[in-house]
Image: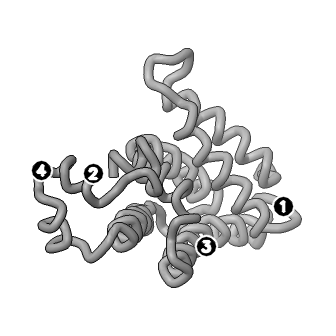
Amino acid sequence: MKLFAREGYAAVSMRRIAAEVGVQAGALYNYTPDKQSLLFTLMHDHMQALLAAVPGDPKADPLARLETFVAFHIRYHHDRPDEVFISYMELRNLTPENFAVIEDLRRRYEDVLESILRDGMAAGRLHTPDTKIATLAVIAMLTGVSTWFREGGRLSLEDITARYWDMVRGAVGVRAQ
């Protein structure tokens, strides 16, 4: 994972991976059939773990669920920079079959947020003309934090999360109760 994140999938050979983990190149094939399988497994495991970790009670207030989702997404992605980088930047290197599997997992994650937005619309708590576009925009915005935020900067991650929560509320048209 570190090699793929640092140098990119295309630049890393199986021989290099073997050297990094301290085995002969031939021995690496006892663990994975090829580099594509390794990339797919890294992405698949990341998405499965992400889906399994999503907090929230589907019966809770939609705005509370949305706030929880925002904080969760920022923290989860901040804590896993290599996984996030690989999962977003190396999609182009997946075979079509593997891409379809990862795309399905990504869609399932997007559906979590879109469900929250739809529930918020139904409850009259927010207004957005298109929940799918809002979902994609919010996820892109939240994921972006992991590309630029560094500990020790002007604001803490909690401060950033609070500011992003304000921006998300505006983006999805949160209405006062």
As displayed, is residue 164 above or below residue 54? Answer: above
Which of the marked residues, 2 or 3, is nearer the chain's N terminus? 2
As displayed, is residue 156 above or below residue 106? Answer: above
Question: For the residue labelled by badge 4, is the local secondary structure a helix, a strand or a loop?
Answer: loop
Mark 1–mark 2 distance (CA, rounded to whole Å): 48 Å
The amino acid at mark 4 is: Gly
Between 54 and 148, the one nearer to me in the picture: 148
Q: Residues within 10 Å of mark 4 (few under 14, many from 20)?
A: few
Give the number of the mark in front: 4 or 1: 4
Which of the marked residues, 1 or 2, is nearer the chain's N terminus? 2
Q: Residues within 10 Å of mark 1 (few under 14, many from 20)?
A: some
The residue that disc 3 covers is 111
Please give the name of the residue rendered at 49% of the width and 24% of the height, measured from the top-left corner.
Answer: 156
Disc 2 and disc 3 in contact, CB within 8 angstroms: no
The residue that disc 1 covers is 128
Between 7 and 85, the one nearer to me in the picture: 7
Give the number of the mark in front: 2 or 3: 2
Question: For the residue labelled by badge 1, is the local secondary structure a helix, a strand or a loop?
Answer: loop
The amino acid at mark 3 is: Asp
Q: Is residue 45 visible?
A: no
Is residue 76 left or right of 177 when viewed as pictured? Answer: left
The residue that disc 2 covers is 16
The amino acid at mark 2 is: Arg
Is residue 138 left or right of 159 when viewed as pictured? Answer: right
The amino acid at mark 1 is: Thr
Q: Residues within 10 Å of mark 3 (few under 14, many from 20)?
A: some
The x, y position of residue 99, in whole percent, is 54, 75
The residue that disc 4 covers is 22
